Image (spheres, grey):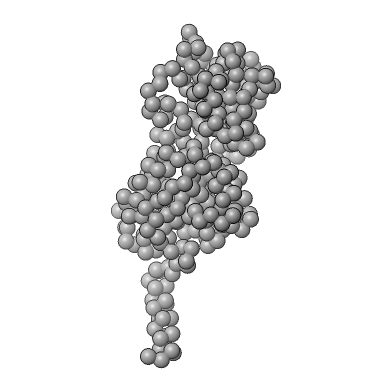
Amino acid sequence: MSRFLTAAIFLTAILAMLLLGKPVFSAEERSVDTLNVAVAANFAKPLQFFANQFSQITGIETRITVSSSGTLYAQLQHGAQFDVFLSADRQRPIALAESGVVHTENVVNYAQGQLAFVYRTSDFTQVPDALSELVLSAMSMGKVAMANPKLAPYGDAAKDVLDTLNLYNDMQTHRVIGKNVLQTYQFFTTNNVSGAFVAYSLTPVVMQEQDKNIGTFLVPSSLHKPIVQSLAINSRVKAQLVPNRFNELPFNKSDALMRVSASNLFVQYLLSDKVQAQLNEWGYLPAKKTDIVGPPEVELVQK
């Protein structure tokens, strides 16, 4: 067979695929049997649950790496082969796009975190109804922990709340700062502080752990800026996220696997109506709730 005939057959095959709407994946887009997914620790448990569902539906397995957003971000900057990176904030995925590691449109919101204040019910004969009184009471009995506002989105949200309640300055001598929200929660569970601002997703009430000694106060979202959690698809090729195949019923597995790369399909699943509706069970709000930006607009609560 001549080189000319071989080339013609190859080009004809490519043209046929294009006419049929079958994309030709590049090396970094091609569907794979196993996806490498990196996730911030606060979202590790729900991600494992959703990843198992995704594998059952598509047959694509996921290998999950759990660490802090900062650590995973640094690894990606140095060439880590994660297919998808789920951060606890929006800043790091955006930074990956701005530095050219990923396509600018490969950064999307996947959830909104919720802030909670945890305390020991045994410290109270009657638990105050107001958050400000609850925090003040915890301060009077010891120290209160929060994540570093400069490093952790949940710490930044906690600072918003304390500023709004006019308690931030009063808390200076009663404050313990954690590197992240997990360490902050550990300060509380190891009895080093009387109360702590943590991710609602970590609390016993959400994790269905039987601990009657720990009380949870879900902080109203109006008291702080949204805690937007974003992900980045690790590719310089623009992601194909629309239409969302999992919102099309019935789900056509063979067609989806042929037309959409594995990483894109995984993100489509996380953004699907089904998964977004389940986020509340894990202590999060849907990504569509993350449109509001800017400082909280609420009246100050006086002590």
Left or right side of 293 for 64: left
Camera-side residue of 258 and 87: 87
Image quadrant holding the N terminus, namely bottom left
Location of residue 55 with respect to 151 vertically, above or below = below
Location of residue 2 with respect to 203 vertically, above or below = below
Q: Residue at x 52, y 20 (%)?
A: 191
Q: How many marks?
A: 0
Residue 176 percent across, percent down from the top left: 62, 24
Q: Residue at x 49, y 23 (%)?
A: 189
The image quadrant that residue 71 belongs to is top right
Image quadrant holding the C terminus, namely top right
Camera-side residue of 31 and 300: 31
Q: Residue at x 59, y 47 (%)?
A: 92
Left or right side of 250 for 85: right
Q: Residue at x 53, y 51 (%)?
A: 232
Q: Is residue 143 visible?
A: yes
Left or right side of 300 for 110: left
Q: Is residue 157 visible?
A: no
Residue 255 percent across, percent down from the top left: 34, 62
Location of residue 157 with respect to 189 vertically, above or below = below
Camera-side residue of 43 and 282: 43
Residue 78 percent across, percent down from the top left: 59, 54
Location of residue 81 with respect to 45 vertically, above or below = below
Residue situated furthest bottom in the rendering: 2
